[in-house]
């Protein structure tokens, strides 16, 4: 229940995804399977890229960073959700909620930046193949990766500061299953307009700007591929870019829907379904999308474990 109106909130109570005990048991096993697949899939990608010298290329360097971010994102939310499926009162301390908010925004926004960087890598590989090795040097890749993590840190710092700076007194019931800004804004005891505008501005920078870069990159990629004389070359180019494009659509589509709508404060139960998608499902699907559609990753897997 909520605290007295004059008392600052020290913990939050989640309503979770369901109040029905049987449904919660089913969801527990479903989320447990998803989490295990997420951990195994992303760890496998990281290990394969590390041990197979054929995967020591810019594309797989960024993919390793993406897998690590997915692993952190999922681990920050799903274990807590699993515990909450088994208990009646689903609580998290104010400090714990703050830490969850920081980590989720950091790795989530870093993923957005990494996907844009990976689209640029594919653009250079397809449109400027003769200059690829001179443009995408190891030092350039390291700088792009550092820049991606730095941009995630900046957005996380701004969004977290504005969200947690609001007073939370009285109501501490969150109609959600983890801490994120749209869910917390509903509980604030003050006007949230400036916070919503700050979050929207950060969303423009970390969501819409990278999407624009991705669209430009793929417009040039498609134009170049169409002009290719070799059918085999076109097929290879589309295959290499197809996996990345699928991940982009899944990740950005749900994130933009969640954070770039007006009146984000007015969350509905349906928004929790969208949150499940980008916070749980996408992290599981990414390694499978890249591995199942990627010949190099599959060959590295059979080389390492096929015996």
Image (cartoon, rainbow, N blue to C red):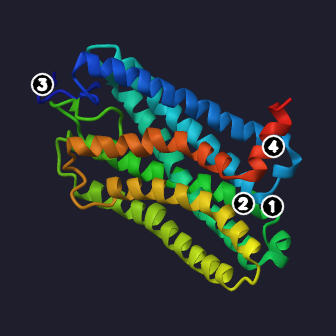
Choose the circle earlier in sequence order: 4 or 2: 2
* Mark in the foreground, 4 or 1: 4
Q: Look at mark 3 in the image and give the residue it sits on.
A: 4
Circles 2 and 1: CB atoms closer than 8 Å: yes
- Residue 172 is tagged as none
State whether residue 66 appears in this view.
yes
Mark 1 crowd level (few <14, some 14–19, many ≥20, 10 Å Cα): few
Image point (44%, 34%), residue name? 100
- Disc 3, disc 1: CB below 8 Å? no
Name the side, left or right, on which 6 lies relative to 225.
left
Q: Residue most toward the left?
A: 5
Residue contact at pointers 3 and 4, CB within 8 angstroms: no
The first of marks 3 and 1 along the sequence is: 3
Indicate the position of residue 218 as horizontal and vertical percent values: 58, 74
Mark 4, residues whose alpha carbon is within 10 Å: few (<14), some, or many (≥20)? many
Instruction: Measure the alpha-carbon separation of dots 4 and 1.
Output: 25 Å
Return the residue at label 4. 300
Q: Quadrant of the C terminus?
A: top right
Q: Earlier in the sequence, mark 4 or mark 1?
A: 1
Q: Which residue was labeled with disc 2?
A: 143
- Neighbor class of circle 2 (other Cα within 10 Å; few <14, some 14-19, many 20+) is few
Residue mark closest to the camera, 2 vs 3: 2
* Residue assigned mark 1: 139
Residue 228 in the image: above or below residue 120: below
Q: Residue furthest top?
A: 87
Residue located farthest toward the front when viewing the structure as drawn: 231
Q: Disc 2 versus disc 1: distance between alpha carbons? A: 6 Å
Q: CA distance from mark 3 to mark 4?
A: 59 Å
């Amino acid at each position: 229940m909520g605290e007295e109106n004059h008392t600052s909130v020290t913990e939050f109570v989640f309503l979770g995804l369901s109040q029905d005990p049987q449904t919660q048991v089913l969801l527990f096993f479903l989320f447990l399977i998803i989490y295990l697949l997420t951990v195994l899939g992303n760890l496998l990608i990281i290990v394969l890229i590390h041990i197979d010298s054929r995967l020591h290329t810019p594309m797989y360097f960024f993919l390793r960073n993406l897998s690590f971010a997915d692993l952190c994102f999922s681990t920050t939310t799903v274990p807590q959700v699993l515990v909450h499926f088994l208990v009646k009162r689903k609580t998290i301390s104010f400090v714990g909620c703050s830490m969850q908010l920081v980590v989720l925004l950091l790795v989530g926004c870093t993923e957005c930046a990494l996907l844009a960087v990976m689209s640029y890598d594919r653009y250079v590989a397809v449109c400027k193949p003769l200059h690829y090795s001179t443009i995408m040097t190891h030092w350039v890749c390291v700088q792009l990766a550092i820049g991606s993590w730095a941009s995630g840190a900046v957005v996380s710092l701004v969004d977290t500061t504005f969200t947690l700076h609001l007073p939370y007194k009285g109501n501490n019931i969150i109609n959600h299953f983890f801490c994120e800004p749209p869910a917390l804004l509903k509980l604030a005891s003050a006007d949230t307009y400036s916070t919503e505008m700050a979050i929207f501005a950060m969303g423009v920078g970390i969501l819409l700007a990278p999407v624009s870069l991705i669209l430009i990159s793929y417009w040039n990629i498609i134009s170049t591929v169409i002009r290719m004389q070799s059918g085999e070359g076109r097929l290879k180019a589309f295959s290499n870019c197809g996996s990345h494009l699928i991940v982009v659509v899944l990740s950005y589509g749900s994130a933009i829907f969640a954070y770039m709508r007006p009146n984000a404060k007015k969350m509905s139960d349906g928004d929790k379904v969208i949150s499940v998608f980008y916070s749980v499902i996408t992290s599981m699907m990414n390694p499978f999308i890249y591995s199942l559609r990627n010949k190099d990753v599959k060959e590295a897997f059979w080389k390492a474990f096929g015996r």
